Amino acid sequence: MSISKSSLTSIPTCYATVSIGTPTTPLPQKLSAIAGAGFQGIELGFPDLLSFASQHHDREIKPQDFDALCDAGKEVAELCQKNGLKVVMLQPFANFEGWKEGSEEREDAFRRAKGWIRIMQAVGTDMLQVGSTDSPSALPSLDALASDLRALCDLLSPHSFRLAYENWCWATHAPDWKDVWSIAQRVNRPNIGLCLDTFQTAGGEWADPTTASGLLEHPGGKEALEKQFAKSLEELGKTVPKEKIYILQISDAYKPTTPLDKEPDEEGMRPRGRWSSCLRPIPFDGGYLPVVDVAKAVLRTGFRGWFSMEVFDGGPEGSDQEWKDMGAYAKKAMRSHERVLEECADS
């Protein structure tokens, strides 16, 4: 499918609140910077809601104090309205699917789900991002994973809410777009779709932060890797219906200055998870992933929905920024968004 420049002019722009400032940066300041750069919507990060709720109530709010979180969420909705921002999605809902039947973890997952649905109502969003589980204890059966997600879809459905399922490239059983698409088909509910991500796709199928080259080691070398990745992207463009893509997240990645250890860290985080947390800049700002190639593949499905900047930019060394000028950074992100679209256009 051809990608005409004119077809890209109506793509709405979104920015993740967790991708600017720090968790303690006041949310109103983040929203002002995002709106000032011309973005139309936000992904509301749960850490930002938690921080805002603690400031709002002048006490520490726990992650499952849903009454307090919903009360603060109503204030967030008003702030977004004042800034002309739509709350596109609540994120990231993690480690939901795949727990053993009857386990405490499974009970907690569904308790959290019901609480997050209440938060969605409070903040005025209709979409919940669910990242593919990275728990080593998750059941390996795709049917079991799909069964849990089907149950979540059924909890969301009475509210006309949708589930955006994202492949996290360090996930236990569903690290690639093909995996989450296969599971979504098994779920077989009208309110499940995909949250695709340039980092998660290229970072899982093309790059590797544990190698000296920064690339996956392919028996056939780099040329074979490029062909394999191009084939996967071509399949994505021809396979996933446009209406089953709910959002495309945009970010690049720095090549680690020293290859990351292949083993999980002390907290059990796998190397791609560590890479994701602090080495993801905006495109064209020092990264090396084929971001435009992934975006083109998604656009070739016919998708023209939300493009959302979700970056975790700690600089090439992965150290935290000082965030002296969030407004300038958000404007740089908007210029990056515009350039991504320019380079995606065939004509």
Image (cartoon, helix red, strand yellow):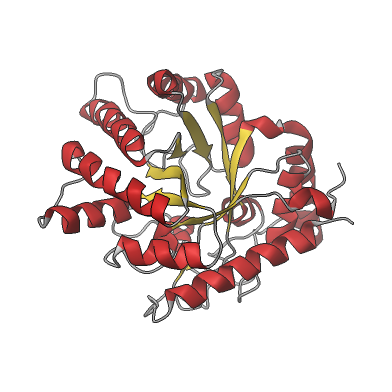
Between 175 and 59, which is closer to the camera in this rendering? 59
43 left or right, relative to 39: left
Q: Residue at the left extreme?
A: 59
Q: Residue at x 37, y 75 (%)?
A: 320
Rendering coords of residue 251 (x, y %): 57, 61
The vertical placement of 51 against 175, above or below, is below
**Above or below, comparing residue 328 to residue 33 in the picture:** below
Residue 55 seen? yes
Q: Position of residue 49 (x, y in %)?
A: 29, 51
Closer to us: 96 or 341: 341
Residue 345: quadrant of the picture: bottom right
In which image quadrant can residue 125 be found? Answer: top left
Lateral position of residue 48 relative to residue 4, left or right: left
Q: Is residue 214 visible?
A: no
Closer-to-camera residue (6/90): 6
Q: Residue furthest front?
A: 82
| 94 is higher (above) or lower (below) than 144 | below
Residue 185: percent from left, percent from top = 60, 23
